[in-house]
Image (cartoon, helix red, strand yellow):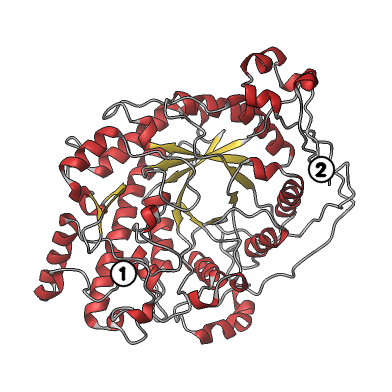
Amino acid sequence: MALTLRFSTPFINHKDTLKNLKPLEISICSSVSFPQVSRRSLCLRNSLLHEDAKLSRLDKSMFSDWRKEEKRENHHVLSGGRKSGSKVPVFVMLPLDTVTLGGNLNRPRSLNVSLMALKSAGIEGVMVDAWWGLVEKDGPMLYNWEGYMELVKMVQRHGLKLQVVMSFHQCGGNVGDTCSIPLPPWVLEEISGNPDIVYTDRSGRRNPEYISLGCDSMPVLRGRTPIQVYGDFMRSFREHFREYLGSVIMEVQVGMGPCGELRYPSYPESNGTWQFPGIGEFQCYDKYMRASLKASAILIGKTDWGRNGPHNSGQYNQFPEDTGFFKREGTWNTDYGRFFLQWYNGKLLEHGDQILASAEGIFQGTGAKLSGKVAGIHWHYGTRSHAAELTAGYYNTRHRDGYVPIARMLGRRGVILNFTCMEMRDGEQPQHANCSPEGLVRQVKMATRIAGTELAGENALERYDERAFAQVLATSRSDSGNGLTAFTYLRMNKNLFDGENWRNLVSFVRSMSDGGRMIILSEYDSSASDLFVGLVSKRDLNMKEVVLL
């Protein structure tokens, strides 16, 4: 299927386009056009999913109870949830390097055209990371928001909305990281002088992705605590963008850990440390975390329990049954195991609550919603211990629901729970990894329903196929009020604008706007948002065509 994208003159300043084109961009360009969409090719796919049963008992028998619970769920609709049949707005994540290391907007012409395309497809808006390592890199409380201001104004001109992530973590070393943005240089200096302010594993390996939550209340960053530093950053953002909050900037996602997620960096991919589907390792061996563990053990009269973390919890790439802690009848299910896991999880929840309390006070009355991201750790979900979730800080086992406490913590602050892996199916995962992304998503949906917390979603991996979009559609629906309030698609790049990929995205966006009913664009519907992509030579530049990201 051939595709070509063309834009009319009013959208682009032709002189600026020619003047700023780089040699590579002149020789190979993409052009785009967006006609009005025909709605003649409609079909319904996938009946409503039977909604989730209570997940207080996480064993295999719970899955047989979904149908029994469905009728009861229909009588408990939440005011904050989304019923089946209502629109689910779709956002698209912008590239990680949307703002350059110099603080300027990256490839603004290309971005401008891409935003035009997204708007024409019915996209609600875009998401961007506001990197701590870029904005505050010149020194404590020296903020540079220039590139982000240019982006906000561009988004506004296109009639789109913006989700901004307060990204207090480094970029690089994880799935999908295509560039490197470390923490601010002055923070790295502090880490060099005091390595214990970053997470540390049992073997002493330091992880500079994110400041350890163990020192949240310690003035380790040039006289300020990490919580104060995060608060000052968010306050500066509010002051610079006050006039856009609630009108253009509709959501502020508050980063609370590596990848912006509320979790420990238990499965770092950098330097091959961890590989899927390893169980990961506990990150509680910096001096601040160890001091907290010791104090908690003394408090209950079990001094020995506070000397160190579990000695038999294995290594990053092992499986649960390879360890004494996580195996079927392992230490995780003993008094000591329960004490340690409650402490480890409790520290994570306390960390999240402190940051969100700060954010709540800063953004209250601005009109912008707050959200927090929770990781979709679906591997080893089918085992009793749920080892990979435990090392990440989610105390979720076959006998204990670990997501209701998280949902309640977020809900108390009026924060949306943003969850990943919405596109994944159990049958697509390797059998030996005991994965169940579908079971995990059902559990998190039920947790938000119980807590009365709004739920939004993301895809965990780049997917462009109909099957992945259909799974998100199914997940978005619910008659019990715990469907998705929004979905953010990962991520905008050149592949997204390829013909079939673009067609699938447009169909998906329209389906989400149509209450979760699957809308299929006809293969021969040339009037309906087909994207024709081809090479443009120098002599074709008078067509006023530009490069897509």
Q: Quadrant of residue 4?
A: top right
Q: Secondary structure at mark 2?
A: loop
Left or right relative to 9: residue 294? left
Give how far across and how far down residue 268 sits, in percent.
37, 57
- The residue nearer to you, when weighing 290 against 354, is 290
Kind of residue sitting beneath label 1: Gln
Instruction: Estimate the x, y position of residue 36 in percent, counting from the top left.
Output: 84, 38
Rendered position, 76 above or below 113: below
Q: For the residue marked with disc 2, what is the amino acid?
A: Asp
Q: Which residue is mark 2?
A: 530
Would you say residue 160 is visible in this rendering?
yes
Residue sitting at 42 percent across and 25 percent down? 102
Q: Earlier in the sequence, mark 2 or mark 1?
A: 1
Q: Position of residue 403 (x, y in %)?
A: 43, 67
**Closest to the observer: 280 or 372?**
280
The residue wearing badge 1 is 315
Where residue 215 sits: x, y (%)?
A: 20, 50
- Residue found 74% across the figure and 68% down from its top: 46
